């Protein structure tokens, strides 16, 4: 009787070992499949949020021009530098002076001071500085991504203060948001 019991025990142990080997193979196969899917998807999407194709290596930011009355004289230069810096910081693209895989250009078309939130005495309760940029984007690797679009953002300041008191504080915030919006449209495809 001991031999039958020992034989049954060995059979159970062999079945357990076979099951463990089979599970190990399934888990290894699943891990390899999952790894290949992740690696494949990372070639298009990056953890910075960009969806740029891996064959895009360079970007050119042509000088945006001031096509409106008003605004600081250095506004186009400041905007250009912010745009270049953002692409350098948040992508692996190399910024070239010309012939990039991606090209951005355009005009600052609006620098407007608006009275908003009227009070009972027909005066503005708040003033608003709004900047509008017309951007033209060319993707030399995929022309279906090309576009021309206006981007606009604003900041409010109290009615009892002047634009010159607030301009140096508000303009960088507005430009940062417009740069982010352009970046999201061009590199993150939002």
Image (cartoon, rainbow, N blue to C red):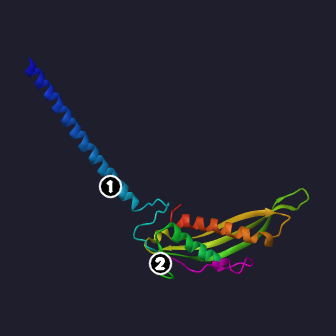
The residue lying toward the viewer, choosing from 38 and 129, is 38
Residue marked by disc 2: 100
| Quadrant containing the N terminus in the rendered view | top left
Q: Does the magenta stretch include residue 178?
A: no
The residue lying toward the viewer, choosing from 176 and 153, is 176
- Neighbours of disc 2 within 10 Å: few (<14), some (14-19), many (20+): many
Residue found 59% across the figure and 65% down from its top: 180
Instruction: From the top left corner, tell me how far across and down residue 95 is, in percent.
Output: 50, 77
Q: Which mark is residue 36?
A: 1
Q: Quick check: 157 left or right of 5?
A: right
Mark 1 near mark 2, Cβ–Cβ under 8 Å?
no
Q: In which quarter of the image is residue 115?
A: bottom right
| Distance between mark 1 and mark 2 Cα atoms | 31 Å
Q: Residue lying farthest front? A: 2
Q: In which quarter of the image is residue 10?
A: top left
Instruction: From the top left corner, tell me how far across and down residue 61 is, in percent.
Output: 55, 77
Callout 2: helix, strand or loop? loop
The residue lying toward the viewer, choosing from 8 and 30, is 8
Residue found 80% across the figure and 70% down from its top: 165
Q: Quick check: 164 left or right of 12?
A: right
Q: Is residue 71 magenta?
A: yes
- Neighbours of disc 1 within 10 Å: few (<14), some (14-19), many (20+): few
Which segment is the magenta one? 59-77
Instruction: From the top left corner, tell me how far across and down residue 3 is, in percent.
Output: 8, 22
| Image height of 156 relative to 69, above or below | above
Callout 1: helix, strand or loop? helix
Instruction: From the top left corner, tell me how far across and down residue 179 is, in percent.
Output: 60, 68
């Amino acid at each position: 009787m001991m031999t039958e019991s020992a034989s049954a025990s060995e059979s159970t142990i062999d079945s357990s070992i076979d099951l463990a080997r089979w599970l190990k193979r399934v888990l290894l196969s699943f891990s390899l499949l999952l790894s290949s899917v992740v690696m494949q998807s990372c070639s298009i999407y990056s953890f910075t949020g960009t969806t740029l194709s891996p064959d895009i290596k360079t970007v050119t930011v042509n000088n945006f021009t001031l096509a409106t009355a008003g605004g600081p004289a250095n506004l186009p230069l400041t905007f250009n530098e912010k745009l270049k810096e953002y692409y350098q910081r948040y992508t692996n693209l190399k910024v070239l002076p010309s012939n990039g895989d991606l090209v951005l250009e355009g005009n600052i078309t609006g620098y407007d001071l608006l009275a908003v939130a009227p009070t009972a005495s027909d005066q503005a309760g708040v003033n608003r500085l709004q900047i509008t940029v017309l951007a033209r984007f060319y993707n030399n690797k995929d022309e279906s991504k090309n576009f021309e679009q206006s981007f606009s953002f604003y900041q409010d300041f109290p009615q009892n203060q002047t634009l010159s008191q607030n301009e140096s504080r508000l303009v960088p915030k507005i430009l940062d948001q417009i740069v982010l919006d352009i970046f999201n449209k061009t590199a993150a495809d939002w």
